[in-house]
Amino acid sequence: MNRLQVELPGLTLKNPIMPASGCFGFGREFSKLYDIGQLGAIMIKAATLEPRFGNPTPRVAETPGGMLNAIGLQNPGVEKIMAEELPWLQQFDVPIIANIAGSTVEDYVSVAEKISAAPNVHALELNISCPNVKTGGIAFGTDATTAMELTRKVKAASAVPVYVKLSPNVTDIVEIAKAVEMGGADGITMINTLLGMRIDLQSGEPLLANRTGGLSGPAIKPVAIRMVYEVSRNVSIPIIGMGGVASAEDALEFLYAGASAVAVGTQNFVDPFACPSIIEELPRLLDRLGLSTVKECIGRSWKSNEPIAHHCP
Amino acid sequence: MAIIKDICTVIRVKKIADSIFEMVLEGRIADEVENPGQFIHIRVTEGNAPLLRRPVSIAAVDKKNHRLTIIFRSGGQGTLLLSRKVPGETLDILGPLGNGFPVDKVDSGGTAILAGGGIGVPPLYGLGLKLREQGVKVISVLGFQTAESVFYQDEFASLGETYIATVDGTSGTKGFVTDVLNERGFEADILYTCGPLPMLRALEAGDYARETYLSMEERMGCGIGACFACVCRKKDDPNGHSYKKVCSDGPVFKAGEVLI
Ligand SMILES: Cc1cc2nc3c(=O)[nH]c(=O)nc-3n(C[C@H](O)[C@H](O)[C@H](O)COP(=O)(O)OP(=O)(O)OC[C@H]3O[C@@H](n4cnc5c(N)ncnc54)[C@H](O)[C@@H]3O)c2cc1C
Ligand SMILES: Cc1cc2nc3c(=O)[nH]c(=O)nc-3n(C[C@H](O)[C@H](O)[C@H](O)COP(=O)(O)O)c2cc1C
Ligand code: FES
């Protein structure tokens, strides 16, 4: 038995660790550094119907323990991704989770229809939480009814399970989570970045050309953990958790909070070997804590207050 | 050439001008360096602040001893931490990154101008060494703010004619690199440059050599081409979807290729 294996709708993951969308491109660069076939899954960069250039630079700024980004969903468009990136990714034995974004409901539906037909796309990640585009993105993720409607339409168009990526920039994330569950979501991924801003002291202007950007990295982990904890107790669909994961310990914390798998974003920039390191470390961490499988860790923070049984692996 | 992550040892740190430090590092990355103008991505702390790596050009490489020299200005949090490293300490470094300057565009016996501004000067030194090795005549024109910030004047002088410009006139010609070039009117086959954007723009617009290559800077995330933080537009498609990534397609571009 593979003690790291987890099962989610559409996804049999050999381990619960995957790179988060936008932090791994389409895998080409990282494939030169290590065998990306060892990843649990890959969440590819957002696909939109038409190619997008994204925002002007500077697109990144730093904050203690985190970074702000305003890339603006730059991508070559769904056609090109399907013609060039997805076929290339087929050489690896890794399920692909395709992140999709759009400005209108029709955009989302159309991208979902197209990209879900690719043989290695095992699930969609419906991005209703990008804070860096003027239209679409987060606008669909901050209102429960809108989020539910969009989920329903995308779900109807998609050939594979649909995970909805939630934004933390809402008053009540549980309300949105319940709404997308009602809309037919097969799972939830969370969290996307927190809207933030930095101002340059010399010029007096915002550091980012887009003025605002999304905060990610270790700084947001406690927010993400709290939200995964709350959402997982209130929905019955699985969650892929993310936000500041830098180590196997962080990943376990997300599992404990209620996530069934964990994505690594910003840490890929800090340490491009972050994902394989975490995958390698995870069994050792389980051993140290007397845990036998990843599965038994899921939701431990609220499922049971009993001491963990000590199994021998 | 492969990009690797290596734990490099700090061999030497020396202040060589006002806020300017020269650091010698030892590690396997030196073995992988292909072209002058490539850079390394340095993790300046094992902690979380600052979180991101810092891109710094390779100023010179000594393959025999597996050593790299970098030269940086200590200003912000990251470079300040870097300047405080002492010999024997280690640094987590990713590299070599980027394409570097093409050194095969000028024949032996030809003339190359190296035009550097401030902290853009370092990669030109390694380039000059390489060009000299290939029998190319090197003319260096280096611009700084003031006399206290001038560095590597002697090193460049050992490669060939070297001219200094300072904004306040405290060393060399008063003014900019372009003032020296306009005044002297060198005949050159190729011009290589690295420095602040206004300088790059002026050199691109001017007619100083048959061909011009410029090294760009942009804020980076990954440094390897995966995050789209560092893109710039292509000159032939200023409003479209074409782009180049400074980290992986650059940092060196042929003049006219990207919008600066
Ligand atoms: C390809 C390349 C080569 C470089 N080579 C050199 C070199 O040889 N010597 C040298 O002194 N500097 C070089 N720089 C600039 C160097 O990266 C910055 O000076 C450094 O990142 C500043 O970090 P800091 O923490 O001190 O400053 P802060 O201002 O506190 O940095 C904040 C953030 O902005 C980024 N940043 C700030 N200035 C720059 C800049 N000019 N370019 C890109 N990112 C920046 C930092 O990386 C960091 O993420 C190079 C930059 C690039 C892109
Ligand atoms: C540079 C960058 C680009 C991103 N691009 C996307 C994207 O295209 N689609 C998306 O859903 N999330 C995107 N994200 C958000 C991440 O997938 C992730 O949700 C977030 O960064 C939190 O995780 P982290 O703290 O581990 O980075 C991006 C994040 C960063 C830092
Ligand atoms: S820094 Fe990530 S693509 Fe260039």
Image: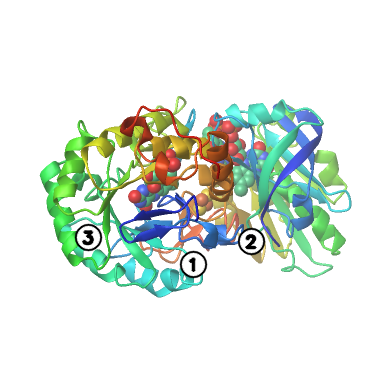
Q: Amino acid at mark 1?
A: Asp
Badge 3 crowding class, 10 Å Cα cut-off, few under 14, some 14 to 19, many 20 or more, is many
Residue placed under numbered mark 2 in the picture:
B212
Ligand 1 is located in which of the four quadrants?
A: top right
Looking at the image, is mark 3 or mark 1 earlier in the sequence?
1
Q: Position of residue A183 (x, y in %)?
A: 14, 52
Residue carrying label 3: A108
In depth, the one of A219 and B232 nearer the eye is: A219
Subunit that carries the residue with mark 1: A
Relative horizontal placement of residue A257, taking residue B172 as reference (left or right):
left
Q: Nearer the viewer, residue A307 or B245?
A: A307
In the image, what residue occupies the spot 38% across and 41% down? A298
- What kind of residue is marked 3? Tyr
Is residue A10 at all visible to an observer of this figure? yes
**Distance Cα–Cα, label 3 vs label 1:** 27 Å
Mark 3 and mark 2: Cα distance apart in space:
44 Å
| Foreground: disc 3 or disc 2 | 3
**In the displayed structure, does residue A101 sit left or right of residue B19?**
left
Q: Provide the chain ID for the residue under circle 2.
A: B
Residue with the mark numbered 1: A93
